């Protein structure tokens, strides 16, 4: 609605319409790390949720565990979350869900990686690959995330 006073116009409504349009079309903040671009909000959501889940898992555990193991698993899950977000470029909501999933998976990430290494024959005991892995390593790693 515009008001006229002689030859002068009040442009209050025009300015607010332009401001509303400009605010609605602001692109997301894009960050760059090591040459890779990603949305800042998605990275914050994903890493934050992953960190909170890992802290919750660590604090829920009643046994005395080595903090070095917790820190190593937390670092691994944060790196997996960050690389997933950089690769997939999800919206903040899906980044939040992904970070929560990686945080909950925890040491299971190592188990999944070992399965893929075995699948491609990279963990042979004859010295042709990465090296031998104990058959019960997956079960031991899975026990890391179980509260006692």
Image (cartoon, rainbow, N blue to C red):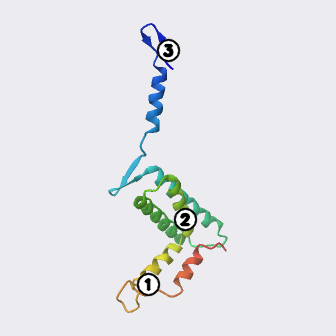
Q: Quadrant of residue 101?
A: bottom right
Vertical comparison of 127 with 110: above or below: below
Q: Which one is in front in this view, the residue at disc 3 or the one at disc 1?
A: 3
Identified at 56% across, 81% down, the residue is 140
Mark 1, residue position: 118
Q: Secondary structure at mark 2?
A: helix
Query: Could you tell which of marks 3 and 2 lies nearer the N-terminus?
Result: 3
Q: Are the residues flagged by discs 1 and 2 in contact, CB closer than 8 Å?
A: no
Residue 112 screen position, x and y as percent:
49, 76
Identified at 48% across, 65% down, the residue is 75
The alpha-carbon separation of the residues under discs 3 and 1 comes to 76 Å
Mark 2, residue position: 101
The alpha-carbon separation of the residues under discs 3 and 2 comes to 56 Å
Number of the label disc, if any, that sits on residue 55: none
Residue 40 screen position, x and y as percent:
44, 50
Mark 3, residue position: 3
Residue 117 screen position, x and y as percent:
42, 81
Classify mark 3: residues with Cα within 10 Å, few (<14), some (14-19) or many (20+): few
Residue found at the very far left of the displayed protein = 35
Identified at 57% across, 77% down, the residue is 142
């Amino acid at each position: 609605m515009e008001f006229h006073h002689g030859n002068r116009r009040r442009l209050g409504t025009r300015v607010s319409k332009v401001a509303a349009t400009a605010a609605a079309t602001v692109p997301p903040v894009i960050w760059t790390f090591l040459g890779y671009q990603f949305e800042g909000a998605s990275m914050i959501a994903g890493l934050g949720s992953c960190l909170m889940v890992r802290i919750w898992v660590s604090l829920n555990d009643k046994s005395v565990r080595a903090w070095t193991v917790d820190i190593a698993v937390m670092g691994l899950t944060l790196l997996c979350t960050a690389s997933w977000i950089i690769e997939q470029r999800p919206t903040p909501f899906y980044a939040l869900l992904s970070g929560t999933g990686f945080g909950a998976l925890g040491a299971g990430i190592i188990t999944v990686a070992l399965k893929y290494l075995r699948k491609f024959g990279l963990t042979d005991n004859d010295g042709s690959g990465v090296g031998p892995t104990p058959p019960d390593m997956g079960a031991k790693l899975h026990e890391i995330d179980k509260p006692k």
